[in-house]
Amino acid sequence: MYFFIVNLTSRTGKAREIWIKVEKELRRREVAYEAHITKYAGHGRELADQLCTRGAACPEGACLVVVGGDGTVNEVINGMHDFERVRFGYIATGSGNDLGRGLEIPKDPLKALEGILNAAEPYRMDLGLVTDGEGRERRFAISTGIGIDAEVCRQALTSGLKKVLNHLGLGSLTYVLLTVKSLFTMPTTELTISFDNGEKKKISRMIFVAGMNHPWEGGGVPMAPRADCQDGKLSVCCVYGIPRLKAFFLLPWLVQAKHEGLKGFEIVDCEQYELAIARPMAVHGDGEYLGDQTHVTCRCMRGMLQVMK
Protein backbone atom coordinates (compact mmCIF):
# COMPACT_ATOMS: atom_id res chain seq x y z
CA MET A 1 0.00 0.00 0.00
CA TYR A 2 1.18 3.51 -0.82
CA PHE A 3 0.35 6.22 1.70
CA PHE A 4 0.91 9.78 0.44
CA ILE A 5 1.41 12.64 2.87
CA VAL A 6 0.86 15.82 0.87
CA ASN A 7 1.65 19.41 1.82
CA LEU A 8 -0.35 21.51 -0.63
CA THR A 9 1.09 24.77 0.71
CA SER A 10 4.70 23.84 -0.10
CA ARG A 11 6.50 26.29 -2.39
CA THR A 12 3.82 28.91 -1.83
CA GLY A 13 1.07 26.60 -3.05
CA LYS A 14 2.70 25.31 -6.25
CA ALA A 15 2.66 21.85 -4.69
CA ARG A 16 -1.08 21.68 -5.39
CA GLU A 17 -0.44 21.65 -9.15
CA ILE A 18 2.20 18.96 -8.74
CA TRP A 19 -0.08 16.78 -6.64
CA ILE A 20 -2.87 17.02 -9.24
CA LYS A 21 -0.46 15.61 -11.85
CA VAL A 22 0.77 12.86 -9.54
CA GLU A 23 -2.73 11.80 -8.50
CA LYS A 24 -3.88 11.72 -12.11
CA GLU A 25 -1.00 9.37 -12.93
CA LEU A 26 -1.75 7.15 -9.94
CA ARG A 27 -5.33 6.76 -11.11
CA ARG A 28 -4.25 6.10 -14.69
CA ARG A 29 -1.98 3.30 -13.45
CA GLU A 30 -4.69 2.00 -11.09
CA VAL A 31 -2.29 2.13 -8.14
CA ALA A 32 -3.77 1.37 -4.71
CA TYR A 33 -3.04 4.43 -2.58
CA GLU A 34 -4.35 6.79 0.07
CA ALA A 35 -3.74 10.53 0.16
CA HIS A 36 -3.50 12.45 3.44
CA ILE A 37 -3.27 16.25 3.28
CA THR A 38 -1.39 18.12 6.01
CA LYS A 39 -3.51 20.83 7.60
CA TYR A 40 -1.23 22.50 10.15
CA ALA A 41 2.34 22.58 11.43
CA GLY A 42 3.26 19.21 12.91
CA HIS A 43 0.43 17.36 11.16
CA GLY A 44 2.90 15.44 8.98
CA ARG A 45 4.43 13.93 12.11
CA GLU A 46 1.03 12.83 13.42
CA LEU A 47 0.03 11.33 10.08
CA ALA A 48 3.32 9.44 9.78
CA ASP A 49 2.82 7.93 13.23
CA GLN A 50 -0.68 6.74 12.37
CA LEU A 51 0.20 5.45 8.90
CA CYS A 52 3.32 3.61 10.05
CA THR A 53 1.18 1.72 12.55
CA ARG A 54 -1.18 0.70 9.76
CA GLY A 55 1.62 0.02 7.29
CA ALA A 56 3.59 -2.17 9.67
CA ALA A 57 0.50 -4.37 10.04
CA CYS A 58 0.26 -4.97 6.27
CA PRO A 59 1.71 -8.35 5.22
CA GLU A 60 3.84 -6.69 2.52
CA GLY A 61 4.60 -3.58 4.56
CA ALA A 62 3.92 -0.12 3.15
CA CYS A 63 5.51 2.83 1.40
CA LEU A 64 5.11 6.27 2.95
CA VAL A 65 5.52 8.95 0.25
CA VAL A 66 6.02 12.63 1.03
CA VAL A 67 4.85 15.20 -1.50
CA GLY A 68 6.24 18.42 -0.09
CA GLY A 69 9.45 20.16 0.88
CA ASP A 70 12.35 19.34 3.17
CA GLY A 71 10.39 20.66 6.17
CA THR A 72 7.55 18.23 5.51
CA VAL A 73 10.07 15.38 5.24
CA ASN A 74 11.48 16.33 8.63
CA GLU A 75 8.04 16.17 10.21
CA VAL A 76 7.39 12.77 8.64
CA ILE A 77 10.69 11.09 9.62
CA ASN A 78 10.10 12.25 13.19
CA GLY A 79 6.71 10.55 13.22
CA MET A 80 7.87 7.34 11.54
CA HIS A 81 8.52 4.06 13.33
CA ASP A 82 8.78 0.38 12.40
CA PHE A 83 11.46 1.38 9.92
CA GLU A 84 12.05 -2.23 8.82
CA ARG A 85 8.42 -2.56 7.73
CA VAL A 86 7.84 0.88 6.23
CA ARG A 87 9.67 2.28 3.24
CA PHE A 88 9.98 5.93 2.26
CA GLY A 89 9.42 7.79 -1.00
CA TYR A 90 9.81 11.46 -1.87
CA ILE A 91 8.38 13.75 -4.52
CA ALA A 92 9.98 17.14 -3.92
CA THR A 93 7.90 20.29 -4.23
CA GLY A 94 9.87 22.69 -2.00
CA SER A 95 12.16 25.56 -3.00
CA GLY A 96 15.26 24.24 -1.22
CA ASN A 97 15.12 20.59 -2.37
CA ASP A 98 18.36 19.59 -0.61
CA LEU A 99 17.16 16.05 0.11
CA GLY A 100 16.06 15.50 -3.49
CA ARG A 101 19.41 16.85 -4.65
CA GLY A 102 21.31 14.56 -2.29
CA LEU A 103 19.33 11.46 -3.30
CA GLU A 104 19.42 12.38 -7.00
CA ILE A 105 15.64 12.24 -7.21
CA PRO A 106 14.33 13.69 -10.49
CA LYS A 107 12.76 17.13 -10.25
CA ASP A 108 10.04 15.99 -12.63
CA PRO A 109 7.33 14.67 -10.24
CA LEU A 110 6.17 11.96 -12.64
CA LYS A 111 9.71 10.65 -13.05
CA ALA A 112 10.11 10.67 -9.27
CA LEU A 113 6.84 8.73 -8.98
CA GLU A 114 8.11 6.26 -11.59
CA GLY A 115 11.20 5.60 -9.48
CA ILE A 116 9.08 4.96 -6.38
CA LEU A 117 6.63 2.60 -8.10
CA ASN A 118 9.36 0.62 -9.86
CA ALA A 119 11.90 0.46 -7.04
CA ALA A 120 13.08 -3.04 -6.29
CA GLU A 121 15.64 -2.97 -3.50
CA PRO A 122 15.43 0.01 -1.12
CA TYR A 123 18.28 2.48 -0.82
CA ARG A 124 19.45 2.47 2.80
CA MET A 125 19.97 6.05 3.97
CA ASP A 126 21.44 7.22 7.28
CA LEU A 127 19.47 9.61 9.46
CA GLY A 128 20.86 12.00 12.04
CA LEU A 129 19.68 12.61 15.59
CA VAL A 130 20.17 15.88 17.47
CA THR A 131 19.59 15.96 21.24
CA ASP A 132 19.50 19.18 23.27
CA GLY A 133 20.62 19.70 26.88
CA GLU A 134 17.19 18.72 28.21
CA GLY A 135 17.16 15.40 26.37
CA ARG A 136 14.72 16.41 23.63
CA GLU A 137 15.47 14.55 20.39
CA ARG A 138 14.89 15.39 16.74
CA ARG A 139 15.80 13.28 13.73
CA PHE A 140 17.12 14.96 10.59
CA ALA A 141 17.59 13.74 7.03
CA ILE A 142 19.82 16.48 5.62
CA SER A 143 21.63 18.42 8.31
CA THR A 144 21.65 20.03 11.72
CA GLY A 145 23.45 23.23 12.57
CA ILE A 146 24.15 25.87 15.16
CA GLY A 147 25.05 29.48 14.46
CA ILE A 148 24.45 31.41 11.29
CA ASP A 149 22.86 28.59 9.26
CA ALA A 150 20.32 28.01 12.05
CA GLU A 151 19.70 31.75 12.37
CA VAL A 152 19.04 31.92 8.63
CA CYS A 153 16.62 28.98 8.88
CA ARG A 154 14.77 30.72 11.71
CA GLN A 155 14.40 33.91 9.68
CA ALA A 156 13.43 32.04 6.49
CA LEU A 157 10.45 30.40 8.22
CA THR A 158 8.69 33.77 8.51
CA SER A 159 10.41 35.70 5.75
CA GLY A 160 8.21 37.69 3.41
CA LEU A 161 11.21 37.78 1.08
CA LYS A 162 11.07 34.00 0.69
CA LYS A 163 7.41 34.14 -0.36
CA VAL A 164 8.18 36.76 -3.02
CA LEU A 165 11.20 34.85 -4.36
CA ASN A 166 9.26 31.57 -4.37
CA HIS A 167 6.67 33.18 -6.65
CA LEU A 168 9.53 34.17 -8.97
CA GLY A 169 11.05 30.67 -8.86
CA LEU A 170 14.07 31.98 -6.92
CA GLY A 171 13.29 30.58 -3.48
CA SER A 172 16.82 29.30 -2.81
CA LEU A 173 18.13 32.87 -3.19
CA THR A 174 16.39 33.64 0.12
CA TYR A 175 19.05 31.72 2.04
CA VAL A 176 21.91 33.54 0.31
CA LEU A 177 20.49 36.98 1.08
CA LEU A 178 19.65 36.10 4.69
CA THR A 179 23.12 34.60 5.15
CA VAL A 180 24.78 37.84 4.10
CA LYS A 181 22.53 39.82 6.42
CA SER A 182 23.10 37.50 9.40
CA LEU A 183 26.84 37.34 8.82
CA PHE A 184 27.15 41.01 9.77
CA THR A 185 24.51 41.10 12.53
CA MET A 186 24.64 37.79 14.42
CA PRO A 187 26.98 37.69 17.46
CA THR A 188 29.67 34.99 17.39
CA THR A 189 30.52 32.83 20.40
CA GLU A 190 32.95 30.30 21.84
CA LEU A 191 32.31 26.57 22.12
CA THR A 192 33.95 23.23 22.73
CA ILE A 193 33.31 20.38 20.31
CA SER A 194 34.00 16.80 21.40
CA PHE A 195 34.24 14.02 18.81
CA ASP A 196 33.59 10.31 19.30
CA ASN A 197 37.31 9.50 19.09
CA GLY A 198 37.92 11.52 22.25
CA GLU A 199 39.30 14.58 20.47
CA LYS A 200 38.21 17.94 21.87
CA LYS A 201 38.51 21.25 20.07
CA LYS A 202 37.97 24.72 21.49
CA ILE A 203 36.56 27.15 18.96
CA SER A 204 36.51 30.92 19.28
CA ARG A 205 34.45 33.34 17.17
CA MET A 206 32.23 30.51 15.95
CA ILE A 207 30.19 31.45 12.88
CA PHE A 208 28.52 28.06 12.47
CA VAL A 209 28.93 24.32 12.99
CA ALA A 210 26.88 22.15 10.61
CA GLY A 211 26.52 18.37 10.89
CA MET A 212 25.86 17.17 7.35
CA ASN A 213 24.23 13.90 6.26
CA HIS A 214 24.13 15.10 2.64
CA PRO A 215 26.51 17.57 0.96
CA TRP A 216 24.01 20.42 0.62
CA GLU A 217 21.76 22.54 2.80
CA GLY A 218 20.10 25.94 2.51
CA GLY A 219 18.96 25.45 -1.08
CA GLY A 220 22.11 23.92 -2.56
CA VAL A 221 25.05 25.25 -0.50
CA PRO A 222 27.69 22.45 -0.45
CA MET A 223 28.73 22.70 3.20
CA ALA A 224 30.38 19.25 3.12
CA PRO A 225 30.97 18.26 -0.52
CA ARG A 226 32.08 14.71 0.36
CA ALA A 227 29.27 13.92 2.82
CA ASP A 228 27.82 10.46 2.19
CA CYS A 229 24.39 9.47 3.57
CA GLN A 230 25.38 5.78 3.53
CA ASP A 231 28.72 5.82 5.37
CA GLY A 232 27.37 5.84 8.93
CA LYS A 233 28.97 9.22 9.65
CA LEU A 234 28.17 12.92 9.74
CA SER A 235 30.45 15.41 8.03
CA VAL A 236 30.87 18.30 10.47
CA CYS A 237 31.67 21.63 8.84
CA CYS A 238 33.07 24.22 11.27
CA VAL A 239 33.60 27.87 10.32
CA TYR A 240 35.27 30.02 12.97
CA GLY A 241 38.03 32.40 13.96
CA ILE A 242 37.93 34.67 10.90
CA PRO A 243 36.74 38.29 10.58
CA ARG A 244 33.21 38.79 9.28
CA LEU A 245 34.38 40.75 6.22
CA LYS A 246 36.80 37.96 5.27
CA ALA A 247 34.05 35.39 5.76
CA PHE A 248 31.84 37.44 3.43
CA PHE A 249 34.46 37.44 0.67
CA LEU A 250 34.94 33.68 1.13
CA LEU A 251 31.25 32.92 0.56
CA PRO A 252 31.78 32.34 -3.21
CA TRP A 253 34.34 29.64 -2.35
CA LEU A 254 31.79 27.99 -0.06
CA VAL A 255 29.05 28.12 -2.69
CA GLN A 256 31.42 26.58 -5.25
CA ALA A 257 32.55 23.82 -2.83
CA LYS A 258 36.11 25.18 -2.80
CA HIS A 259 36.32 26.00 0.90
CA GLU A 260 38.02 22.84 2.16
CA GLY A 261 41.50 23.68 3.40
CA LEU A 262 40.88 27.41 3.70
CA LYS A 263 41.82 29.01 7.00
CA GLY A 264 38.77 29.12 9.27
CA PHE A 265 37.03 26.22 7.49
CA GLU A 266 37.31 22.66 8.79
CA ILE A 267 35.41 19.45 7.98
CA VAL A 268 35.56 16.39 10.24
CA ASP A 269 33.78 13.05 9.68
CA CYS A 270 32.50 11.28 12.80
CA GLU A 271 29.69 9.10 14.09
CA GLN A 272 28.88 11.45 16.97
CA TYR A 273 29.89 14.86 18.34
CA GLU A 274 28.92 17.06 21.26
CA LEU A 275 28.82 20.85 21.53
CA ALA A 276 29.13 22.93 24.69
CA ILE A 277 28.35 26.55 23.78
CA ALA A 278 29.27 29.63 25.81
CA ARG A 279 25.89 31.28 25.27
CA PRO A 280 22.55 30.17 23.77
CA MET A 281 22.62 29.93 19.98
CA ALA A 282 19.98 29.01 17.42
CA VAL A 283 19.88 25.31 16.41
CA HIS A 284 18.10 23.76 13.42
CA GLY A 285 17.31 20.30 12.10
CA ASP A 286 16.60 20.16 8.34
CA GLY A 287 15.90 23.89 8.44
CA GLU A 288 13.39 23.60 11.30
CA TYR A 289 14.22 25.90 14.22
CA LEU A 290 14.85 23.88 17.40
CA GLY A 291 15.31 26.72 19.86
CA ASP A 292 18.38 28.45 21.28
CA GLN A 293 20.66 25.93 23.01
CA THR A 294 23.89 25.77 25.02
CA HIS A 295 24.41 22.00 24.80
CA VAL A 296 23.81 19.74 21.79
CA THR A 297 24.71 16.15 20.92
CA CYS A 298 24.46 14.87 17.34
CA ARG A 299 24.88 11.31 16.10
CA CYS A 300 24.40 9.29 12.94
CA MET A 301 21.77 6.52 12.75
CA ARG A 302 23.23 4.18 10.14
CA GLY A 303 20.98 2.90 7.33
CA MET A 304 17.78 3.65 9.20
CA LEU A 305 15.60 4.86 6.31
CA GLN A 306 14.63 2.58 3.41
CA VAL A 307 14.22 4.91 0.44
CA MET A 308 12.37 3.90 -2.73
CA LYS A 309 13.79 5.83 -5.68
Image (spheres, grey):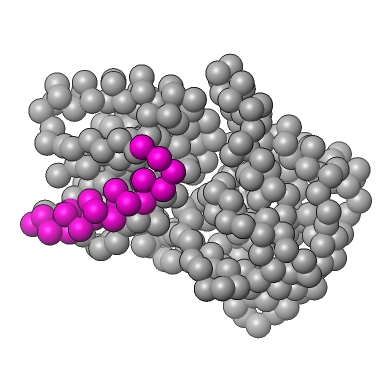
Furthest-bottom residue in view? 198
- Percent x, y of residue 47: 29, 48
Furthest-top residue in view? 168
Viewed as shown, does residue 224 lie left or right of 42? right
- The answer to which quarter of the image holds residue 265 is bottom right
Residue 12, can we see it?
yes
Of the pair 272 and 106, the residue shown nearer to us: 272
Of the pair 47 and 67, the residue shown nearer to us: 47
What residue is shown at x 21% (from left), y 21% (from top)? 24
What residue is shown at x 26% (from left), y 31% (from top)? 114
- The magenta-colored residue range is 39-59
- Percent x, y of residue 57: 12, 59
From the image, which quarter does the N terminus lie in?
A: top left
- The answer to which quarter of the image holds residue 155 is top right
What residue is shown at x 73% (from left), y 43% (from top)? 254
- Percent x, y of residue 69: 45, 37
Residue 77 lies in the magenta stretch: no
- The answer to which quarter of the image holds residue 134 is bottom right
Viewed as shown, does residue 135 lie left or right of 116? right
Viewed as shown, does residue 144 lie left or right of 43? right
Identify whether 133 is placed above or below 127.
below
- Percent x, y of residue 234: 56, 62
What residue is shown at x 11% (from left), y 55% (from top)? 58
